[in-house]
Amino acid sequence: MKALPPLTIINGRLVLAHGDPQAGALRCEGDRIVAVGAAAVPQPGDRVFDARGALIAPGLVDLGVFAIDKPAFHFGGITRAALMPDQGMVLDKPAAVRFAAQSGKPDLWVHPLAAATKGLEGTELAELALMRDAGARAVATGRRWIADSGTMYRLLSYCAMLDLVVVTHAEDSGLAGQAVATASEMATRLGLPAAPAAAEALAAARDIALAELTGARLHIRQVTTAVALDLVRAAKARGVRVTAGVTPAHFMLSDVAIGDYRTFTRLSPPLRSEADRHAVRAAIADGTIDVIASGHDPRGPEDKRLPFADAEPGMAGAETLLPLTLALVRDGVIDLARAFSLLTATPARLLGVTAGVLEPGAEADIAVIDPDRPWVVDSDKMAASAGNTPFDKQGVDGRVIALFKGGAAVT
Amino acid sequence: MTSATQTPTDRYPAGSAAFPHRDLTGLAGLAPWEILFLLDEAEQWVDLNRAAQKRDDRLAGLTIINAFFENSTRTLLSFEIAGKRLGADVVNMLVAQSSVKKGETLIDTAMTLNAMHADAMVIRHQSSGAVRLIAEKVDCPVLNAGDGQHEHPTQGLLDALTIRKFMQGRGGGGGDFAGLTVTICGDILHSRVARSNIHCLTTLGAEVRVCAPPALMPADIDALKVQPFHDFDAALKGADVVMMLRLQQERMSGQFIASPGEYRHLYGLSLDRLALAEPDALVMHPGPMNRGIEIDSNVADLAGRSAITTQVEMGVAIRMACLDVLTRKTRGVEGWA
């Protein structure tokens, strides 16, 4: 590929690690950022992009998607996506990981998450070191929790040695069973199989205890209940290497949303109570939650136009990740710098990639964003391969107006 | 046809305003007068069904499809008889659970039936919400014959009609549900019958108690305006009606209940237990019964107290009323077209 001339983005507001965005420019050479702020001056021969006052932010690093869906990721400003191992061919072999790691290039980098156990069955450890060296950036238990504590203990101690983050799904499988909803008045009215919200805290408590025991780095991909968030908060205070993530659905919606059996609201973990939703927002504000991800999982009618309990869980979230996180800024829950820490810097750090920040030396993954541009989510007109969004017909603010991956414009 | 037990009709509006819904997918959210309207409409069919000539031709020329995705004998038969006694062409489509499990098939099946110009569909499905999903896709009235653990509205209605019949037969109250205490005992968690009865009876003003072991009690059930009990004896005290639910065999093998004997020990309705309720308390069961488990035979067969066969009888009448009312718009009945 012919080398592109350097890129300078001018007249923007730079989203830096702390504080308010600063008016300025950013210059890239090759696939790296070379200058930020006053030092960034276009040189003769540079490609110059005029941001016209929009935000210049790192491209989003989406920690936990279930499908490679480039149009949706690019719409949402996502330049890197950590792919969950739950694929048609489970990412439990080095070859599968190597293939997945190449599958988005050049304009999207896919970071495969290695399946923790063979076939994600939760019993036998997979070839984690081989997969790491084939390009896996972390290890994940997939959609499921590893029920066997002995297996989880061995997994965490091994990953501590390999220095790989273990991404876990916190839902006690015995308590959750076949549940598709949180035990509540709503689930009772609808007659849906339901599990107590405590299924999450039980799973989180065990995984945190084992992480503490082994010194492993644990990332609970979605923490959605007040009790589990308290456990994470306390563990962090003790110095346990635990981080927590969430998707916008759990800070935007409660289980009231499942009231008409709309399967686009069938998620895993299921939507929680209004009190838990508020606890998630508080945990985003106080730093207990480290990552906001899309959980992007486009599902067509064959998986969703079904009775609620028969439908597959998941939502197409890539396009709404940015605007719904920006809504937290607008609501005063967090500031803009922290929003991008949740969307870019922290997930990049967990994945061990030099991206997610606007600093010289970092990968030139840049999103130019108009944070106030209004648009309406429409499940019939999504960039995603399927329109299963629970935010259909809702107005949101914030839109990517230009995206650069490794200094090259994404079109 | 008139009846001595016919109730006055000034408690609901005239014409289609009395029941302004295309479908009957559940009893939750219905107004008291909408439920009373259906009960009152059923009275005439109770009388007809007791006559030698059980025929009314008001649905002649209409096609009713009974699409049952879940096995059923009694409810299907009841709906079939109801449709035929009203003169409709009734077709049963029995979809074995194994052949239609997933995928577009449910909607596809609904669209296929829709293309055959059914005038009403009666649907039973093993998944909660499935009937409403189908109702959104078809052009004719849809009647829920039981969807998963959600609702079984005609069962709720027929139980209310049964209670009213007995109360009237005993010369009390003219069928007023206020002041009546109904105890529903059994697998509340998995029961659509319980949910429809809860919605129906609380809407009509009865005091409803639900009784089950914790594993079979749904979360936050008190939000449905019922009083939860784990102690059956306490739940029976002062009850005017005791409604027993069927306990599925597969739930009695350790996961929910240790054994049938263990269940009967705490929740079986025996004559001794029944004595804790009001002296003439009515005994009900939606059937089919597990005799000797949730209900003893001598209770199930108790003359003057057991309403179990009356429930079956009222079932046909209620289903006739529902089919009649839901097809009035199609038939151009005055005030409904």
Image: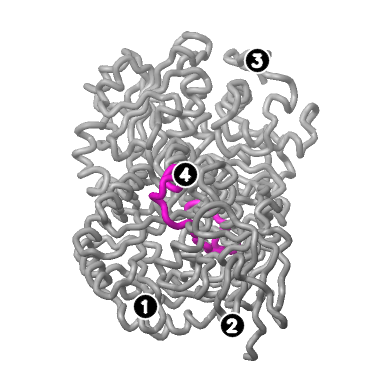
Are the numbered discs 3 and 1 placed on the same chain, yes or no?
no
Chain letter of disc 3?
B
Q: Nearer the viewer, mark 2 or mark 1?
A: 2
Q: Label 4, on which residue?
A: A281
Give the camera-side residue of B2 and A254. A254
Q: What residue sits 61% from the left and 14% below the top?
A: B7
Assess disc 1: are there few (<14), some (14-19) or many (≥20) residues with their C-alpha within 10 Å of its C-alpha: many
Q: Quadrant of the N terminus of chain B?
A: top right
The quarter holding residue A268 reads bottom left
Assess disc 4: are there few (<14), some (14-19) or many (≥20) residues with their C-alpha within 10 Å of its C-alpha: many
The quarter holding residue A207 reads bottom left
Extreme residue in the front direction = A38
Q: Label 3, on which residue?
A: B11
Could you say which disc has been placed on residue A30 in the image? 2
Assess disc 3: are there few (<14), some (14-19) or many (≥20) residues with their C-alpha within 10 Å of its C-alpha: few
Q: CA distance from mark 3 to mark 1?
A: 67 Å
Q: Quadrant of the C terminus of chain B?
A: top right
Are the numbered discs 1 and 4 placed on the same chain, yes or no?
yes
